[in-house]
C-alpha cells in the first residue's frame, strides 16, 4: 500500500510504502490537546515503510518522562504528521489528517485511553477498546 501526505503548507511531505498495521484512535488528554479535543486518529506502521520526501520535521517530546513519544511536526506551519515512541521501537504512527487521502483510513479498529474519554466522544462500532495502552 502506498500512501502520501504532508503538512498544511507543503514544506513537509512523506510517503508510506508498506502495510498499515493498525488503524487507531487515541483519546488521551495529550491527544486531546494536540488534536483540538476530538482525539487522534492514526495509522500504525513499521518505521521502515515511512520516509520524508520533502523537508525535515521538528521534534518534540515531553522532558518529564524519559519514555515519552516524540511528535514530528512542520517547523513552518506547525502541523503534526507523525509520532515515534521509545516503547515501540521500529514503529511509528502517522496522523490520518496528514494523509492526502484520509478516506483511505476507513475507520479505527482500536481505541486507546477511554479512561480519559470525554462525554462528547463517540466510539467507533466494532472497535477493540482499551482503557489505557495495552500492557500498562
Ligand atoms: Zn508545513
Ligand atoms: Zn493519545
Image: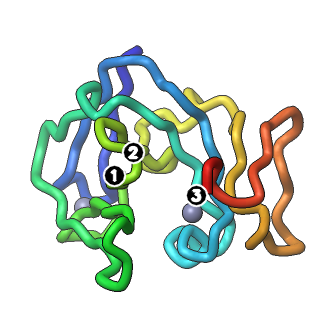
Q: On the image, numbered disc 2 is attached to which residue?
A: 88
Question: What residue do we see at 58% from left, 58% from top?
Answer: 40
Q: On the image, numbered disc 3 is attached to which residue?
A: 40
Nearer the viewer's eye, disc 1 or disc 3? 1
Q: On the image, numbered disc 1 is attached to which residue?
A: 84
The image quadrant that residue 64 belongs to is bottom left
Q: Nearer the viewer, residue 54 or 28?
A: 28
Q: Is disc 1 surrounded by few (<14), some (14 to 19) or many (20+) residues within 10 Å?
A: many
Give the secondary structure at mark 2.
loop
- Tell me the number on the disc at residue 100: none
Q: Nearer the viewer, residue 63 or 119?
A: 63
Sequence-earlier tag: 2 or 3 = 3
Q: Position of residue 85 (x, y in %)?
A: 36, 54
Please tell me in which quarter of the rendered image ligand 1 is found: bottom left
The image quadrant that residue 16 belongs to is top left
Q: Is residue 30 left or right of residue 89?
A: right
Q: Position of residue 125 (x, y in %)?
A: 88, 38
Query: Is label 1 in contact with label 2 (beta carbons under 8 Å)?
Result: yes
Classify mark 3 as within 8 Å of ligand 2 or not, answering yes or no.
Answer: yes
Q: Position of residue 31 (x, y in %)?
A: 56, 68
Give the secondary structure at mark 3.
strand
Give the secondary structure at mark 1.
strand
Please determine whether, in this image, residue 130 is positioned above or below residue 3.
Answer: below
- For the residues marked 1 and 3, what is the alpha-carbon distance in whole angstroms? 14 Å
Please determine whether, in this image, residue 34 is positioned above or below residue 44.
Answer: below
Amino acid at each position: 500500500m502506498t500512501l502520501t501526505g504532508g503538512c498544511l503548507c507543503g514544506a513537509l511531505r512523506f510517503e508510506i510504502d508498506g502495510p498499515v498495521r493498525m488503524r487507531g484512535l487515541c483519546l488521551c488528554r495529550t491527544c486531546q490537546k494536540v488534536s483540538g479535543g476530538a482525539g487522534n486518529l492514526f495509522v500504525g506502521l513499521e518505521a521502515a515503510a515511512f520516509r520524508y520526501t520533502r523537508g525535515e520535521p521538528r521534534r518534540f517530546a515531553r522532558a518529564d518522562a524519559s519514555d515519552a513519544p516524540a511528535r514530528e511536526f512542520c517547523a513552518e506551519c506547525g502541523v503534526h504528521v507523525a509520532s515515534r515512541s521509545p516503547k515501540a521501537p521500529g514503529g511509528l504512527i502517522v496522523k490520518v489528517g496528514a494523509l492526502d487521502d484520509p478516506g483511505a483510513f476507513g475507520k479505527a479498529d482500536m481505541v486507546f485511553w477511554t479512561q480519559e474519554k470525554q462525554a462528547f466522544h463517540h466510539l467507533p462500532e466494532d472497535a477493540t477498546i482499551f482503557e489505557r495502552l495495552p500492557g500498562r
